Amino acid sequence: MELENNNSIKCPVKDLLNLIRQDNIEQLREALLSVIDKSHPNGEIYLYEQGYSIYDANTRSFSPRLIVCRNKSESCLKKSQVIQLASDSETIQFDGFKYLPTDDYVQVFTVESERSTLGLLITINKKIIDEHYIYTLLSAYNHQVYLLRNKDTDSLTGLYNRQSFDSRLAKLHANFGQENRSNDEPSQYCFALLDIDFFKHVNDKYGHVYGDEVLLLFSNLMKKTFRDVDLLFRYGGEEFAILLHDITLEQTYSVLNRFRKKIEDFDFPMENKVTVSSGYCEFNNKIPLSSIVERADKALYYSKEHGRNKVSGFEYLLDKNEIEDFIIEEGDIEIF
C-alpha cells in the first residue's frame, strides 16, 4: 500500500500572485516567508542570500549570510547576529551551517538570490513540509527574483545600475537611524567612487568592444575583492561606486588600496596594464546625501590630479588642509 502524505497541501493561486506582484527584493522575501508561515505555522524559516560565497578568514570556510527569517522565540535580524542558526558548542555542523540538536525536521531548498543563484531556504518544523508545495512557491519566487535582479543590474557588468544606485542609497540614507537601532551594535558605512584611469585612451586605441571587455574584467575583479554585504554599482561609463558596510575609514583605505594593487597587477589583454583612482568618505545621515557623493567625488578628483592610480579619503585630506569642507543643501541641486 502506498503511504499518503498527510502534510501535502495545494499552493493557492493567490499566494503565487502575491509573490509575482512584488516590485522589490525585500518585499518579495517577506512575502515568501509570510506565505510559508501562514500555511505551516509555529515553525522556523530562514532565508540565506549568497549561500556559500562569504569566506571567513578565521575558520577558513565559507558561510551563508542570513537575510530574513521567521522565528517564534526572538528576533533574528540584529546586525550583530552570526551567520548561523546556533553558536553553541554542542551544535551539529552540516554543510556550512550549525544546528542545535532538535527533534524537528530541517529541510533545505535552493533559491535564486539577488546577486547569485546560491541562496538557501531552510525550514524547521515538527512535520515534514510537502516539497511539491515549496517548489511550487519557489518557482514563482525564483522567476520574480530573476526579473527584479535584471531590472536593477547593469547588463554588461552585472553590478547594480544607476537607477538602483539612486533608489538604494536614498532609501538607506533616509532610514539610517532605523538601520542603527539603539539595541543593535551601530553599523558604520563608507562610500567610494572609482574611475578607470585613461579609459578614453583604451576606447580610442582598441575600440569600444575591447573597452567593454576591460569593464567586464574590472567588474569581475570588484566582485572577487569586495564582500557580499558591500553594494557594488556601475555609476556610469568607466566610473563605479561602492557602499561598504561595517567598516572604518582606515579599513576602507586598506580595502580600496588592495583593490587598486590588484587592478595594477592584473594583465588585461592588449593593454596589459590598467589602473584605477578612487576617493571615499564616511556615509551617514548627518549630512545630505548629495554632499556625501560630492565628498567622494572631490577625493577622487584629488587622486586623479595627484598622479592617478591612487586612493584618497576626504576626511584625511580635510585634516591635512588639502581640501575644503562644504555642505550641499538638498534643495540647491539635484542629488544625482
Image: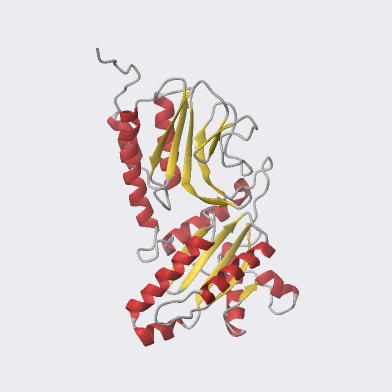
Q: Residue furthest top?
A: 1
Q: Residue furthest left?
A: 1
- Percent coordinates x, y for residue 70 in the rendering: 50, 32
Where 68 falls versus 264 (above or below)? above
Name the residue located 37 percent from the left edge and 74 percent from the top edge.
Answer: 212
Where 106 falls versus 126 (above or below)? below
Residue 335 appearing in the image: no
- Percent coordinates x, y for residue 234 in the rendering: 45, 66
Residue 291 lies in quadrant: bottom right
- Percent coordinates x, y for residue 7 in the rendering: 35, 19
- Number of callouts: 0
The colour scheme is: secondary structure
Observer-nearest residue: 92 or 328? 92
Quarter of the N terminus within the rendering: top left
Name the residue located 59 percent from the left edge and 33 percent from the top edge.
Answer: 86
Residue 123 appearing in the image: yes
Name the residue located 48 percent from the left edge and 81 percent from the top edge.
Answer: 273
Name the residue located 39 percent from the left edge and 59 percent from the top edge.
Answer: 153
Residue 277 lies in quadrant: bottom right
Compared across the picture, whether 166 is left or right of 136 comes to: right
- Percent coordinates x, y for residue 123 in the rendering: 45, 30
